[in-house]
Image (cartoon, rainbow, N blue to C red):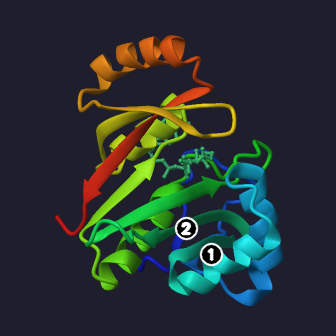
Amino acid sequence: MSDQAWSGRRPWPSSETEGLAIQARAIAPPEYTEAYLFQCQYLDLDPWSAFLARIARHPDLYLVALAGNRVVGVCYGSLSPEREGWATLEGIAVDLGTARGYARKGIGTRLLRTFEKAVLAKGAVALGVGSAEDPGVERFYFKNGFHPVELVAKGQSREELARVAATDYREGCALRAGLKERYHAHEVIWIFEKRLGD
Ligand SMILES: CC(C)(COP(=O)(O)OP(=O)(O)OC[C@H]1O[C@@H](n2cnc3c(N)ncnc32)[C@H](O)[C@@H]1OP(=O)(O)O)[C@@H](O)C(=O)NCCC(=O)NCCS
């Protein structure tokens, strides 16, 4: 089965996903508006110009998952200017609207794999991501081969308040509570990393 087109795992039937091939590929201009609105709903609330700049920087590193011609997922990132051989996953999201039933069908994993292949092709050997503060999302990264490296406490405007090394998830979760209290942090997120091509 190719990475470009596949049918979701569909652990339960859904009138909208049943029999529908989903594609994961680099974004094309007809999808810009829909992907932009999707990105703003789930991830970064960029101005339109910043969204276009993301795509212009690395056109093959802004991916969409499509059900027919409807955008049901996005995934984007960049090559790190500071760490040679490293890429950063800046955003990944799948349509979680329960009526549509696209969650937990492997779409996020497929987007991530397609993204990993794209950055590998550009010479990256490792990938980093700042996870959303959500146990389900953290589990998604574990399931996809990432390991924890740091905790970052952030303020209301997403400014960084503190950064501490943490490689044990359980211990880190206890540390996280302490960091939240100490820095009055709005959120404390995990940084996960993964070697590519293993
Ligand atoms: C994270 C996200 C992209 C996962 O997409 P998805 O297509 O539902 O994920 P997959 O079906 O590929 O999940 C793969 C595995 O990850 C884990 N996982 C994914 N979502 C999970 C959840 N909500 N709770 C627990 N585990 C979860 C499971 O182990 C899952 O395998 P399983 O379903 O066979 O048990 C999606 O939940 C999402 O868009 N979240 C909102 C946006 C967001 O916070 N993005 C992350 C920004 S850092």
Residue under pointer 2: 76
Judging from the image, what secondary structure is the residue with disc 1 in?
A: helix
Q: Residue furthest left?
A: 198
Task: List x then y, in percent, for residue 72.
Answer: 70, 63
User: How many numbered badges does the structure rendering display?
Assistant: 2
Q: Nearer the viewer, residue 137 or 11?
A: 137
Task: List x then y, in percent, for residue 35.
Answer: 74, 70
Q: Position of 43 compared to 161: left or right?
A: right
Look at label 1 and name its amino acid: Arg
Residue 76 appears in the rendering: yes
Judging from the image, what secondary structure is the residue with disc 2 in?
A: strand
Q: Earlier in the sequence, mark 2 or mark 1?
A: 1
Which residue: 54% across, 32% down? 133
Task: List x then y, in percent, for residue 169.
Answer: 30, 26
Q: Nearer the viewer, residue 108 or 173?
A: 173
Numbered mark located on residue 54 in the image? 1
Q: Nearer the viewer, residue 181 or 2?
A: 181
**Above or below for 11 versus 79:** above
Image quadrant where one finds the N terminus:
bottom left
**Above or below for 25 versus 181:** below
Residue 70 appears in the rendering: no
Q: Position of 57 compared to 44: left or right?
A: left
Task: List x then y, in percent, for residue 22.
Answer: 61, 71
Task: Say if mark 2 contacts mark 1, CB within 8 Å.
Answer: yes
Look at label 2 and name its amino acid: Tyr
Which residue: 40% across, 45% down? 141
**Tag nearer the camera, 2 or 1:** 1
**Above or below for 83 versus 129:** below
